[in-house]
Amino acid sequence: MSEVSGAANTRPLLEKAESGRPFGLLLVAMPVFLVGWLVIWPIISAVFRTVWHRDSQGNYGFDLSTYVFFFSDKYSLDNLSITLWTTGVCAFLLLLVCLPIALYLRFSEGRLPAYVQGLAIFPMFVPSIILSYAFIRVLGPNGMVDLLLNAVGLPKIRTPYLTPWGPVIGLVWDNIPLTVLILLSGLGNVANQSIEAARDVGAKRFQVLWHIILPRISNSILVALSFSVLGIFSAFTLPYVLGPAAPEMMGPFMQRTFRDLNDPLSAITQAVVTFSFCIVFGLFYVRSVARNQGK
Amino acid sequence: MSVLKIDNVSKFFGTTRAVDDFSLTVEDGELVCLLGPSGSGKSTLLRMVGGFAQPTAGSITIDGEEITRLPPEQRPTGMVFQSHALWTHMNVFKNLAFGLKLRKLPKEDIDRKVEEVLELVGLSGYGGRLTHQLSGGQQQRVALARSLVLEPKILLLDEPFASLDQHLRERLREEVRDIQQRLNITTLFVTHGQDEALALADRIVVMRDGKTEQVGRPDIVYREPATPFVAGFIGTMNLIEGDVSNKVFNRAGFQVPLDIADGPVTLAVRPESLDLSVDDKNGQAIVHRVTDYGTHGLVDMDLPDGGRLKSMVGHPDMFASGQSVKLNPTAIAAYRDQKLVHRSQ
């Protein structure tokens, strides 16, 4: 008797779940369509246009000449190198700056950490263009730092403005909030008792950090670095305003090739190369996260 | 020989006194339970012994050596945490070997010690398992093994069985007691479970508001509670407020001869010391509910003024709700101004 009533009770639930399926699909249909239209299709289109285009005789066909040119052109390779260098240095500096901030915020109590957190998150609300001009006014030639040094009779600094270090400083500053927030979220999963247990068995502070905390937040570090690397690699505003004219990062390089040189095919090739590097970072991130979760 | 001495230790959090002028000596090989309700300061005290909190005043010594200001990593103590606090990115072997590696022991010694302690806690062959592949009881054993493998002078247990089910808790506490006695390790155990304290401890320290309420052997604390708080906290106790007049305690018709001065008093009677007999004419209480536990029964009764009493009976089927019963206490204690003024056995 009870079995019959049990079966009768479960049927409406199943029917309800099945009847809700089209509605659920409908809900995701619009975002999926937009991703397909605005992201996937342009990628496919860009790749297709760089490998299937009109040659010098005016015939359409498969042609890798734009890629051959990119990877044989010293200027293009220098731009790619400076982009990789900037990305690597920024990622390293972000970890160096943000990890101590996140550790401090996680393991401190009181009002001061709240102010520090506010300060660390503040760059998130500053547009890149404002940040760029603030940078110029502070660290640029005859900027605030130079004026202050001059006031106390010291020589001017060698300004990082229009050097490879200009975008590095700007991009690091710009990416601090997201990196701190992701690391902080990871540190939130490290229980105080885990740390106390490590100290109880004899671990000093650095040993606790190295053996207990860092392995536990490796996923968060990976996520933070992946997000930063993807953003920095394809950054435009900060490298455009603060960086050197040559070599330049891929963002400004694409824009100049497209607009100043009026060479859309080469610009699209540069975009595909940039995207390829980003997708390698992305795949590395997905693989690492999946492997860590598997553990 | 490892003796833990806590001398006049206090701990303030702002204006709140978590531990107030607390003193205790735990003898070599002794297992002392700190027992008290939440907020009584027992965990704070344990954390101060472990080095995770600094006393505001007082001193802590182990074998005569002061450790009050030493950081946890320099103390000869081992702590087992309530949440196990195992490192989930390491397997069981690495959890146990971590402390030994920090001490730079040779690999052979580490392997041997880890294997020995795994055998001690009944987890031989589990070294390669990840901690999330273990049950709650096994995780707690690993946590215990992690402390024991370092051969601490003092073992500190902070409600280690709180997250386990009743059956497992009972089994594990027996195992912990066996291991503690086999190793003869001085142990300080924090719990708010009276049954745990009664079953495990050589001595119980009942704490309340950061102070010692009573210290003694479990049987003494149970049978001869020094204050109404201890009487009410350890086991089940009927605490009956009433008045003594002409050497007779009276509360709503429930009268007991009591040879003390006249005045208000709290009478304490254990349910097992309160005999009942059905008496329709001269009954002092009305049976409210009878609960049969198989081995014994518990009768809840109401006094005429609404006061609730409990009695443990051998044959619960002799009683029924609504019956009038006569009360006959066989052992009582009386408290006045939070002090014991009378006890009869």
Image: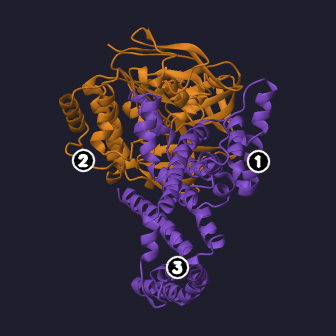
Chain colours: A purple, B orange
Tell me the residue that label 1 is attached to. A134
Q: Residues within 10 Å of mark 1 (few under 14, many from 20)?
A: some
Residue A48 to residue B289: above or below = below
Q: Position of residue B106 (x, y in %)?
A: 22, 27
Q: Position of residue B169 (x, y in %)?
A: 38, 44
Residue B37 to residue A232: above or below = above
* Occupied quadrant, residue B116: top left
Tell me the residue that label 2 is attached to. B128
Residue at the spot 72% in from the left edge and 52% down from the top edge: A132
* Occupied quadrant, residue B195: top left
Q: Position of residue B42 (x, y in %)?
A: 53, 29
Label 2 and label 3: CA atoms lie apart by: 50 Å
Q: Give the camera-side residue of B310 and B63.
A: B63
- Horizontal side of B77 relative to B11 (left or right) equals left
Tell me the residue that label 3 is attached to. A46
Residue farthest to the top? B64
Circle 3 SS class: helix
Please, what is the three-letter code of the amino acid marked with disc 3?
Ala
- Horizontal side of A235 relative to A221 (left or right) equals right
Q: Give the camera-side residue of A235 and B277.
A: A235
Please say if the residues under marks 2 and 3 sit with CB atoms less than 8 Å apart: no
Query: Upstream in the sequence, badge 1 or badge 3?
Result: 3
Q: Position of residue B122 (x, y in %)?
A: 23, 41
Please, what is the three-letter code of the amino acid marked with disc 2?
Gly
Residue B22 to residue A274: above or below = above
Label 1 and label 3: CA atoms lie apart by: 36 Å
Give the chain of mark 3: A
The answer to whether one can see residue B326 in this image is: yes
